[in-house]
Image (cartoon, grey):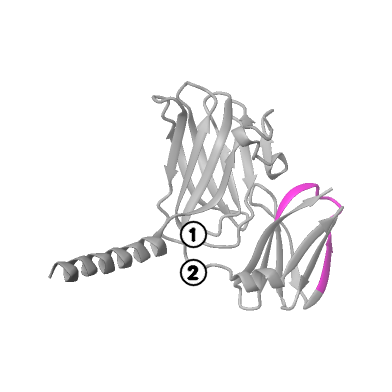
Amino acid sequence: MKNFTLSTLIFLASIFGVCQTINAQEIILEQDGSQDEFVPGDWSVQGGGFANTDQVNVTNGGSGTLVVSNANAYTDISVEMNFSQTGTISFDLRLFEGGSEAAVETGVISDNTGAVNTVIVDFNNTTPITLDALDFSNPNMNVGITYLKITGTEDATSSITEEENNLIKVASNGKTIFVNTDIEGDFELFNLSGKKEFSSKLKSGENQITQNNLEGIYFVRLKNNVGEIVKQTKVVLL
């Protein structure tokens, strides 16, 4: 009986472990300033702030937008941040999908009671979001973000498959965006504020889209003929 009970417990524990793995939070992005892991080129900071490899500095009332390289959709997205300041910080946090705002938490308050001034923002989104940008805005003081981790539960039914994503190549050179794909569909270009700057039809093969009047970081969203998003990425126009 003891052996049976032990075996049963082991079996149940293994099943429970599998269930935990299936529903576990995955790291979408993690950047630790103490390891110089911030990528300044992925940040667009407004209001006089700037990004370094060790931290991102956002001025009082300003904003900082991080472009995220991600092809999968997630529910229950959570964002953890550490700050260099010791005072309580209030701010707004927004998630973007395909250049459009997908979720927002306003008036978030940091916890400066411990050794590190930190905050964890749980969006609790039940609708999957293919996160491609995060916007930190309207802080009540000058802020230095020293650590950032974004996690979520991957939603397999809504995610872009790795095979689909890899078959489509997007690159930019100067003012021209190059798209190489084996499908036909739609090309859309958004700025960091979510405004659609340009759209056109995609043909199978190589596509070249030139935008002489645009400069900076932009989001590219590609759709197939039935309106499904098959790739989202960023490009830089110089």
- Asked if 189 appears above or below 44 in the picture, the reply is below
- Please report the residue visible at 68 percent of the width from the left and 41 percent of the height from the top: 39
- Asked which quadrant contains residue 108, the reply is top left
- Please report the residue visible at 47 percent of the width from the left and 21 percent of the height from the top: 87
Q: Where is residue 217 in the image (x, y as percent from the top left)?
A: 74, 48
Distance from disc 2 to disc 1, alpha carbons, whole Å, reads 9 Å
Q: Residue furthest left?
A: 1
- Please report the residue visible at 84 percent of the width from the left and 50 percent of the height from the top: 213
Q: Are marks 2 and 1 in contact (CB under 8 Å)?
A: no
* Circle number at residue 44: none
In depth, the one of 10 and 55 nearer the eye is 10
Amino acid type shown at disc 1: Tyr
Quarter holding the N terminus is bottom left
Q: Where is residue 101 in the image (x, y as percent from the top left)?
A: 55, 51
- Asked if 204 appears above or below 218 in the picture, the reply is below
The residue tagged 1 is 74
Secondary structure under the numbered disc 1 in the rendered image = strand
In depth, the one of 193 and 152 nearer the eye is 152
Q: Earlier in the sequence, mark 2 or mark 1?
A: 1
Q: Is residue 208 magenta?
A: yes
- How many numbered circles are shown? 2
The residue tagged 2 is 156
- Asked if 121 appears above or below 222 in the picture, the reply is above
Amino acid type shown at disc 2: Ala
173 with respect to 218 (left or right):
right
User: Which stretch is magenta?
Assistant: 206-219
Q: Which residue lies furthest to the top in this view?
A: 87
Q: Position of residue 76 (x, y in %)?
A: 42, 54
